[in-house]
């Protein structure tokens, strides 16, 4: 097979592969996954055998990674090996023989893959639309809470949210996100943060639904994605990363922690308390 790349080693090949990814966030995500894979196997790509990839998957399972996370990491590995084979850097694609883990369809339908969120954030042509997605996902806001945001609700590193039943709560706002939001403000939107273009009118929920549908169609995302799923994914990801359930409940503005517990339990159908006992 004639080589289509000038890469002379794995590092150069990986750099070339990453440059072929359309999204900056996807490149960062893939780079992180491949670093973990390379660190684990301790071999060159040419030396990797099917047992090595199976071992990587097994390691992820033993560390408690959920099936959707393992599937995503394995997908990254498969992408690299497929690229290396197609450009002639490798003479075979061993990764194609490794099956991806099955994901509980009911749980999967409730979640958004991290890669799809990255694609949507990085793939918007509008700063306003990108920030709407970020506010729903990073802060776990309902779409109605996002659209009600006014510039007067921001103070230093906090944003005050008017939730269901006019209940108010404050959330920490990452500085980078606040700076991005600040760039939206102009003479056309002195009151509401997210408005119809060049009109200081609160953006309608329907406009957000249309935006998401058009975006995922343009990016080739098949998943059923609607605004509330970003809030749900914020909750599940926070819990996966060790967030205290009471803190999450307060951040989401839930009237009872029992509501928040539904997120916690729905994502752990295949676990029980025995998973957390050691001797």
Image (cartoon, rainbow, N blue to C red):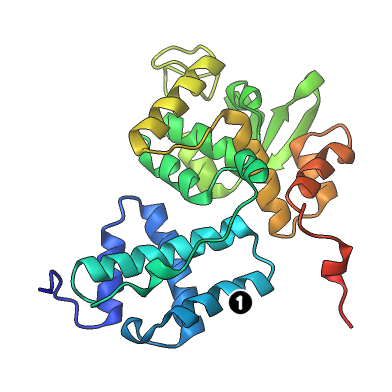
**On the image, which quarter does residue 24 sit in?**
bottom left
Q: How many discs mark residues in the rendered view?
A: 1
Location of residue 219 in the rendering, given as x and y in whole percent from the top left corner: 36, 38
Q: Residue at x 69, y 52 (%)?
A: 238
The residue that label 1 is drawn on is: 59
Location of residue 109 in the rendering, given as x and y in whole percent from the top left corner: 61, 39
Asked if residue 13 is positioned above or below residue 24 in the image, the reply reads below
Left or right of residue 135: residue 18: left
Out of 107 and 165, give the one closest to the viewer: 107
Q: If the image is split into quadrants, where does the C terminus sit? A: bottom right
Asked if residue 95 is positioned above or below residue 117 in the image, the reply reads below
Out of 225 and 155, give the one closest to the viewer: 225
Q: Residue at x 56, y 43 (%)?
A: 112
Location of residue 62 in the rendering, given as x and y in whole percent from the top left corner: 68, 74
Location of residue 221 in the rendering, given as x and y in whole percent from the top left corner: 42, 38
Using the rendered image of the protein, determine whether residue 128 is visible from the camera's viewpoint.
yes
Left or right of residue 107: residue 17: left
Q: If the image is split into quadrants, where does the N terminus sit? A: bottom left
Left or right of residue 278: residue 202: left
Q: Secondary structure under badge 1?
A: helix
Using the rendered image of the protein, determine whether residue 158 is visible from the camera's viewpoint.
no
**Local crowd at mark 1 within 10 Å, few (<14), some, or many (≥20)?**
some
Asked if residue 239 is positioned above or below residue 5 in the image, the reply reads above
Left or right of residue 147: residue 219: left
Q: Residue at x 35, y 87 (%)?
A: 47
């Amino acid at each position: 097979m004639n080589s289509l790349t000038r890469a002379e080693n794995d590092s150069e090949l990986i750099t070339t592969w990453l440059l072929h990814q359309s999204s900056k966030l996807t490149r960062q995500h893939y780079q992180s996954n491949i670093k973990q894979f390379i660190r684990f196997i301790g071999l060159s790509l040419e030396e990797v055998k099917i047992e090595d990839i199976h071992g990587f998957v097994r390691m992820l399972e033993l560390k408690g990674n959920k099936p959707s996370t393992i599937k995503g990491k394995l997908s990254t590995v498969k992408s690299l090996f497929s690229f290396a084979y197609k450009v002639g850097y490798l003479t075979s694609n061993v990764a194609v023989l490794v099956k991806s883990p099955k994901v509980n369809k009911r749980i999967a339908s409730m979640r958004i893959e991290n890669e799809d969120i990255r694609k949507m954030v990085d793939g918007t042509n509008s700063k306003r639309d990108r920030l709407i997605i970020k506010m729903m996902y990073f802060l776990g806001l309902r779409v109605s809470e996002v659209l009600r945001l006014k510039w007067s609700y921001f103070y230093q590193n906090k944003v005050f949210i008017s939730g269901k039943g006019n209940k108010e709560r404050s959330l920490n706002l990452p500085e980078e996100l606040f700076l991005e939001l600040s760039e939206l403000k102009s003479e056309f939107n002195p009151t509401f943060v997210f408005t119809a273009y060049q009109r200081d009118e609160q953006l309608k929920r329907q406009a957000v639904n249309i935006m998401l549908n058009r975006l995922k169609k343009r990016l080739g995302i098949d998943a059923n994605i609607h605004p509330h799923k970003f809030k749900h994914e914020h909750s599940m990801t926070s819990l996966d990363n060790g967030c205290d359930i009471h803190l999450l409940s307060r951040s989401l503005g839930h009237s009872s922690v029992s509501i928040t517990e539904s997120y916690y339990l729905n994502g752990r159908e295949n676990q029980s308390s025995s998973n957390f006992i050691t001797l």
